[in-house]
Image (cartoon, rainbow, N blue to C red):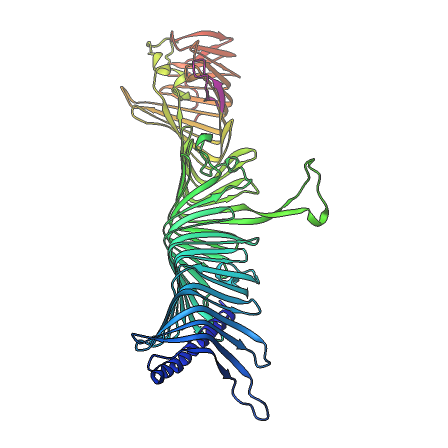
């Protein structure tokens, strides 16, 4: 608060001192008249100090219609008016009251009538009904209907930093001015109205430091409600207590604090406003609701957004131990939780950075208005969000755990760093870094990528090539149901880089895959590139919902597959090729067929085969090997133009232009 308001209190102080002098005179008159006389039409002047060579100027004049000494040590005064003057003779302050009593022994002035003090330039006035002046304690009390008006008082420091110059009104049930402490107190339905600002509470204290700096601090308690409606600072707050310290320009609010400003609203146990309203801090059970503005955060992959529109709101709800808002940054730290319906984000610290953009004002037809008025207002839009420390994101279709997450709305990307782990119905895994884009929707994992993919059916390509084959081209019967009847398993893939979009998952740079769980067998795959292709199909049932199926698997470049069957007997199988395509049967959730091409080499127990192309169809259980195929067996080597092996019957169904040599050829597989 400014020194002008304190000067007004000093005028009240002068009025009180003048009352003291006046009643001392009356008391002396009371003693001489022995309580029998009346004083009518009296005046008591008071002058400025005499200056050399000048006539002393009148400083004030007390005018009373009548003073009546009464029984019990009282003096009744009616029609009291005090006028104060400047050194040039102009009237600057007037004080009036209808009547009052002076209690001689107690040195108190009391009245149940109205009292008014106003400055003639209309910069300050105070009114009340019923007052007490305690001369011993230097205390003034206005007991009812207190109204204070102050003009040209800048209260901008209190709630915001924009300078204002206007009228301020204070109303209350009671007013107390303590001369010794230079403190003023309003109590009972206190309301403060200023230019685009408002404050009310049960009690308000104005604590003065000195006449140069004005009030040192302002404090209040009981149902505190304050509001700033300035265009550059829309802000409101409620609580049970507040204190404003002018030197630090700091406003602290406590007791179930609630506040609201442009784009956000919150609550906490304690809140502090600093830097002319530019910084807001809160501690203890902080809950914030941050407006989503015009950004459709649903389009930003990886940010916690509710799937069900009924659960979504226009605000992101946050909970934390602490909160800070400064300039264009909001920071939450300590047990941070962000919620939107059934989606959530947990972390140690969350930073939300805004950028200010301008909206163009248009007419009803959508045309821009006059250039001088084309800017309607400025809107804070989220530029990026940074989550740090123990970051956990749960969403309708995935969960992510990491140490740092950075959302960049302009690029529609989120970057997860420092040992990222993710979980979903379609794939789970970990990597050093994970990036997710929404336009178009895709993701990329880099560094030490490990992925687990649940797979319907039995993905073990090596096993499709059948049992041991002897020289008679016949073998033992095998259980063909084993391939198609197993329950869902998991495919673990290790790579340096992974790319994911709505239709595929691609692994690059020394990719290794393994079928899990490895209870009765262990299958591993190594290749330069592994691509899993998915396809959405509408279920033919009552729900008609869409389900994503694994449609095919492509291995490209330096493919090596190894399989070890542990039970009932240990068997080993290996395969090499430059390229392999596995097609899945979506209805059965099993392998439909397998195609291996270029330098195909196979080894199963004592049987080794090679060719340029190998094709196996699950339905017919036929394996076709072409491209100068060679099959090496214990009793000889088979050469042919084409070989077709029937796994079900354990016989060759088609062999063209073949020959058998009894001598075993050199092991080219190894």
Is residue 359 visible to us here? yes
Residue shown at 57%/63% (left/top)?
165
Residue closest to the eye, 526 or 310: 310
Residue 309 position within the rendered picture, expressed as x and y whole percent measured from the top left: 47, 30
Residue closest to the eye, 428 or 621: 428
Above or below, comparing residue 298 to residue 517 in the picture: below
How many marks do you count on the picture?
0
Residue closest to the eye, 481 or 500: 500
Residue 570 position within the rendered picture, expressed as x and y whole percent measured from the top left: 29, 22
Above or below, comparing residue 221 to residue 525 in the picture: below
Above or below, comparing residue 459 to residue 24 in the picture: above
In the orientation shown, which residue stands out farthest toward the bottom?
A: 53
In the orientation shown, which residue stands out farthest toward the left?
A: 568
Image: magenta residue range: 534-552
Above or below, comparing residue 442 to residue 404 in the picture: above
The verdict on residue 391 being magenta is no
Residue 568: quarter of image? top left
Residue 121 shown left or right of residue 40 in the figure: right
Residue 253 position within the rendered picture, expressed as x and y whole percent measured from the top left: 40, 57
Residue shown at 35%/20% (left/top)?
605
In the orientation shown, which residue stands out farthest toward the right?
A: 370
Q: Main secondary structure of the magenta part?
A: strand
Is residue 594 visible to us here? no
Residue 46 position within the rendered picture, expressed as x and y whole percent measured from the top left: 49, 83
Q: Quadrant of the C terminus?
A: top left
Residue 369 shown left or right of residue 478 in the figure: right
The verdict on residue 538 being magenta is yes
């Amino acid at each position: 608060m400014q020194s002008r308001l304190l000067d007004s209190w000093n005028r009240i102080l002068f009025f009180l001192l003048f009352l003291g002098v006046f009643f001392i005179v009356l008391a002396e008159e009371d003693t001489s008249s022995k309580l029998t006389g009346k004083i009518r039409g009296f005046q008591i002047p008071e002058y400025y100090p005499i200056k050399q060579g000048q006539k002393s100027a009148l400083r004030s004049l007390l005018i009373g219609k009548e003073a009546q000494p009464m029984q019990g040590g009282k003096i009744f005064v009616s029609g009291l008016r005090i006028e104060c003057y400047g050194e040039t003779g102009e009237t600057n302050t007037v004080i009036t009251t209808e009547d009052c009593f002076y209690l001689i022994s107690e040195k108190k002035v009391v009245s149940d009538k109205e009292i008014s003090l106003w400055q003639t330039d209309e910069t300050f006035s105070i009114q009340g009904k019923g007052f007490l002046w305690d001369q011993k304690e230097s205390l003034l009390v206005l007991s009812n209907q207190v109204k204070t008006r102050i003009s040209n008082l800048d209260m901008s420091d209190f709630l915001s930093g924009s300078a204002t110059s206007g009228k301020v009104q204070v109303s209350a049930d009671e007013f107390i001015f303590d001369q010794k402490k230079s403190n003023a107190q309003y109590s009972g339905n206190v309301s403060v109205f200023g230019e685009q600002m408002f404050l009310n509470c049960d009690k308000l204290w104005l604590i003065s430091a000195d006449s140069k700096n004005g009030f040192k601090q302002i404090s209040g308690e009981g149902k505190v409600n304050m509001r700033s409606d300035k265009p550059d600072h829309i802000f409101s707050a409620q609580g049970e207590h507040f204190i404003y310290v002018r030197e630090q320009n700091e406003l602290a609010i406590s007791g179930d604090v609630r506040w609201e400003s442009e784009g956000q609203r919150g609550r906490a146990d304690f809140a502090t406003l600093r830097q002319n309203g530019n910084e807001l801090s809160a501690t203890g059970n902080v809950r914030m609701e941050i407006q989503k503005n015009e950004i459709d955060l649903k389009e930003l992959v990886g940010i916690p957004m509710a799937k069900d529109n009924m659960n979504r709101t226009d605000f992101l709800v946050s909970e934390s131990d602490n909160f800070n808002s400064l300039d264009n940054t909001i920071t939450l730290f300590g047990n941070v939780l962000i919620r939107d319906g059934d989606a959530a984000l947990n972390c140690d610290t969350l930073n939300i950075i805004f950028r200010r953009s301008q909206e163009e004002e248009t007419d009803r037809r959508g045309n821009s208005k006059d250039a001088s008025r084309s800017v309607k207002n400025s809107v804070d839009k989220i530029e990026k969000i940074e989550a740090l420390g123990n970051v956990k994101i749960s969403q309708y279709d995935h969960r992510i755990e990491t140490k740092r997450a950075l959302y960049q709305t302009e690029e529609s990307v989120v970057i997860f760093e420092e040992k990222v782990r993710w979980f979903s119905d379609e794939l789970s895994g970990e990597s050093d870094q994970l990036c997710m884009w929404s336009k178009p929707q895709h993701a990329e994992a880099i560094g030490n990528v490990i992925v687990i993919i649940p797979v319907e059916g039995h993905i073990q390509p090596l096993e499709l090539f059948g049992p041991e084959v002897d020289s008679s081209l016949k073998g033992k019967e095998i259980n063909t149901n084993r391939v198609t009847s197993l329950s869902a398993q998991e495919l673990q893939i290790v790579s340096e880089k992974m790319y994911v979009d709505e239709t595929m998952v691609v692994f690059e740079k020394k990719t290794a895959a393994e079928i899990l769980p490895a209870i009765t067998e262990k299958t591993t795959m190594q290749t330069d590139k592994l691509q899993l292709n998915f396809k959405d199909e509408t279920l033919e049932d009552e729900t008609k919902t869409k389900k994503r199926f694994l449609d095919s698997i492509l291995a490209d470049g330096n493919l090596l597959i190894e399989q070890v069957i542990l039970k009932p007997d240990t068997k080993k199988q290996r395969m090499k090729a430059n390229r392999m395509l596995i097609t899945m049967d979506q209805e059965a959730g099993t392998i439909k067929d397998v195609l291996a091409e270029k330098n195909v080499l196979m080894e199963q127990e004592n049987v080794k085969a090679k060719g340029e192309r190998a094709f196996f169809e699950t339905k017919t259980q036929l394996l076709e090997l072409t491209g100068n195929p060679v099959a090496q067996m214990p009793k000889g080597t088979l050469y042919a133009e084409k070989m077709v092996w029937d796994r079900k019957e354990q016989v060759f169904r088609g062999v063209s232009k073949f020959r058998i040599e009894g001598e075993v050829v050199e092991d080219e597989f190894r």
